[in-house]
Image (spheres, grey):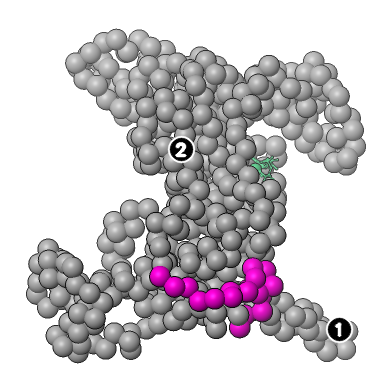
Amino acid sequence: MANSKYEYVKSFEVEDEIMFPNLIVVRVGGRHFQRFSEAHEFEKPNDEKALKLMSLCATSVLQEYPDIVFSFGFSDEYSFVFKQTTKFYQRRASKVVSIIVSFFTSVPIVCASLEVLQEYLAWRQQHCHITNQHNTCLWELVKSGKTEKEALDILKGTQKQERNELLFQQFGINYRTLPQMFRQGSCVLKTEVEGIVKYSENGTPIKRMRKDPTTVHSKNIAGRSFWNEHQSLLKDLGVFTKDVGKINSDYIRSFLFESKLMASTWIVIRIDGCHFHRFSEVHDFEKPNDEQALNLMNSCAVAVLQEFPDVVFSYGVSDEYSFVLKKDSQFCQRKASNIVSIVVSFFTSVYVMNWKAFFPQKELKYCPAFDGRAVCYPSTEILRDYLAWRQVDCHINNQYNTCFWMLVKSGKSKSEAQRALKGTQAQEKKEMLAWFGIDDYNALPAMFRQGSSVFQVHIICSSTEIPSTAFLNIAIQKKTVHDMNISRMIGKHIVAEKYWLIMPVACIARFSLALKSN
Ligand code: GTP
Ligand code: MG
């Protein structure tokens, strides 16, 4: 397809490949999980069902991505270890992280050697033990009538042994008899099992060895005895030759892959559906554009703008959305992987939650995933060119896809349609569409031709001009009306209101309006 003059903006995208022979660990952790666990009334200090749900998610991740060979989790976190030789998404940190975290937030850890991985695992398991012991004491004290603050004061500065004694003497709890999952966390790893793959004609089952994720518990996951007894870990990661001595958490933290995005630049988080070609086939999306699928994407973008105030503008087309964060944003201290993974995981969970509202008749057949990347643009002009690049892409793809599916619907095979379109210019495509009865390409829905944009406008108007909800609904539906009214209202004063607008972007110049109003 043709290149546009805006393609130069691609050069701002930095490569973040994690070099061989580093081992890759992706740690996911819930964001504001205390709020989440309270809102969903989790049992304190451990909710068995919630932990099992986490473990189930980890199992699905291991099933989905064969390159992940081991995982360890407790509370709201899980660490996923990739096999040493992985080439998963060319080892690009942002891709690897964002894909794995469709439901979580994460930090990638690049372990320089197997010894670092071993110490990392020991560190996480030690953390699991310490927090669990502390929280068990805390909630027993609260249950016995202390306030949370009193309980915290009692526990301040206590040692492991003292906490064990407190549990035993005051509450009759032998810490060692509490469920392993609470004390030691859970591991998901792959073990070889024999399974029936099919039946022969005479009904004899045909069996093959396959690798299934299995959940196990162990007191010392970084110990030689646990590690070296699992063949798959030895094969994909290597042998632990020594046991871990004293854990130096500062040393392990130094392996966190935390690149900070340049200060005073626009940050764009671009997310893109993974294998949406297949996803749209499986869910029988209309071709070339499914209005409901696009509206669902737009609803997720609205949720992102509502959740993250630093996102000031967004533009979406097909299975992708670009979110622009304001220049002086300090969100997650501008740490790229944190921002990307939070936005991508939030977007994905809203997509799943909103699915039924947009497709009441369609079952969501499997979990969608999105990948994401962060790119910095130093000036508003370059940012505008970035958006123009995405919009030109939308136009080129839509024109091509409209012709392609017209040809296919008229009886051509997909490869014949591809051949017919190869090398054609915009004018020839216009003629082709006219031949199929589409005289005016511009009469096609604007959302298909131009993509969608979500941003917040602060409408300032006099008290007599406060727009009613009904007016705004009409305004949103009739895009031109609303556009005229926004410009008329801006500049007036007295009452300032905020409105969420979703609209096709007729021209990127409107973007300036969005920025001015923020
Ligand atoms: P990766 O992003 O590399 O994982 O591949 P992908 O399969 O997601 O393809 P890509 O992101 O390049 O393109 C998005 C794909 O999603 C399109 O090629 C379509 O197949 C599909 N898609 C997106 N929106 C629609 C839609 O409204 N209708 C239909 N039928 N398909 C859509
Ligand atoms: Mg995609």
Label 2 Cα crowd, 10 Å radius (few <14 / some 14-19 / many 20+):
few
Say which amino acid is labelled 2.
Answer: Lys
147 sits left or right of 220 in the view? left
Instruction: State whether the magenta stretch is mostly helix, strand or loop.
Output: loop
On screen, residue 511 versus residue 24, left or right, reads left
Residue that label 2 marks: 260
Q: Quadrant of the N terminus?
A: top right
Answer above or below: position of 43 versus 307: below
Q: Which of these two is toward me, 268 or 26? A: 26
Q: Over which residues does the magenta segment extend?
A: 229-246
Residue where numbered disc 1 is placed = 200
Task: Tell me: residue 90, above or below residue 242.
Answer: above
Residue depicted at 44% across the width and 41% down the height: 335
Residue drawn where x is 39% and y is 56% of the image: 250
Determine the residue positioned at 17% across, 82% down. Answer: 166
In percent of width and height, residue 146 lies at 9, 72
Whole-Å distance between the Cαs marked 1 and 2? 57 Å
Q: Identify which residue, 291 or 86, lies in the foreground.
A: 86
In this rendering, the label closer to the viewer, 1 or 2: 2
Q: Say few, some or many: other residues with alpha carbon within 10 Å of mark 1 (under 14 / 14 to 19 / 20 or more).
A: few
Sooner in the amino-acid sequence: mark 1 or mark 2: 1
Residue at 37%, 39% (x, y): give it. Answer: 333
Residue 193, given in percent of the width and then of the height, sits at: 69, 82
Quarter the C terminus occupies: top left
